[in-house]
Amino acid sequence: MFRLRRLLCSMLIVTLAFGAMPVMASASSTPLASTADVLSAQSQNDARDRITQVLAREDIQRQLVAQGVDPSEVEKRVAALSDSEAQQMADQLDNMPAGASVVGVLFAVFVILLVTDILGLTDVFPFVR
């Protein structure tokens, strides 16, 4: 009985040791994301979603067309914003009064498109050369 128990214990130790190796190897090859990284990515996605929701409104779309800006170009510009620019724009949208949101959004979009035209990244406004 003693030999059987000793043999079983030895086999169990070896099995557990070899069974845990693939788990340890996979854990060391894929780094885990920290909580701050996950929260940062979530807030960046939330900022882009807020901007997209505001720009998807019908009154905003009409004003963009009235200003001579293609709404699909605006969507591309929003997608091309850096994370800090998207967060800054979303914060500006949150801080605007309710009645001025349309004008403020249009002004913010106009300024972003104007800056990208001046830098030569886009060609939206013909008066910028």
Image (cartoon, rainbow, N blue to C red):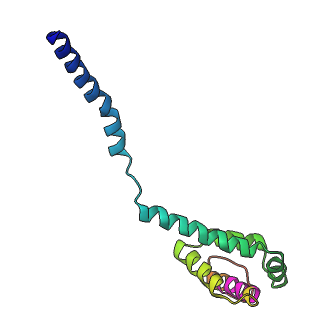
Q: Residue at x 53, y 72 (%)?
A: 83
Q: Is residue 108 left or right of residue 103?
A: left
**Residue situated in front as seen by the camera: 29 or 122:** 29
Q: Is residue 116 left or right of residue 66?
A: left
**Residue situated in front as seen by the camera: 21 or 77:** 21
The image quadrant of residue 29 is top left
Q: Position of residue 74 (x, y in %)?
A: 72, 74
Compared to 57, does 19 lie above or below?
Answer: above
Q: Residue at x 34, y 33 (%)?
A: 22
**Residue situated in front as seen by the camera: 6 or 85:** 6
Q: Position of residue 129 (x, y in %)?
A: 67, 87
Examine the structure image and report whether residue 64 is included in the region drawn in magenta. no
Q: Residue at x 23, y 18 (%)?
A: 11
**Which SS does the magenta portion mostly show?**
helix
Q: Is residue 19 left or right of residue 113?
A: left
Q: Position of residue 59 (x, y in %)?
A: 83, 80
Examine the structure image and report whether residue 105 is included in the region drawn in magenta. yes
| Magenta span | 102-111
Compared to 83, does 19 lie above or below?
Answer: above
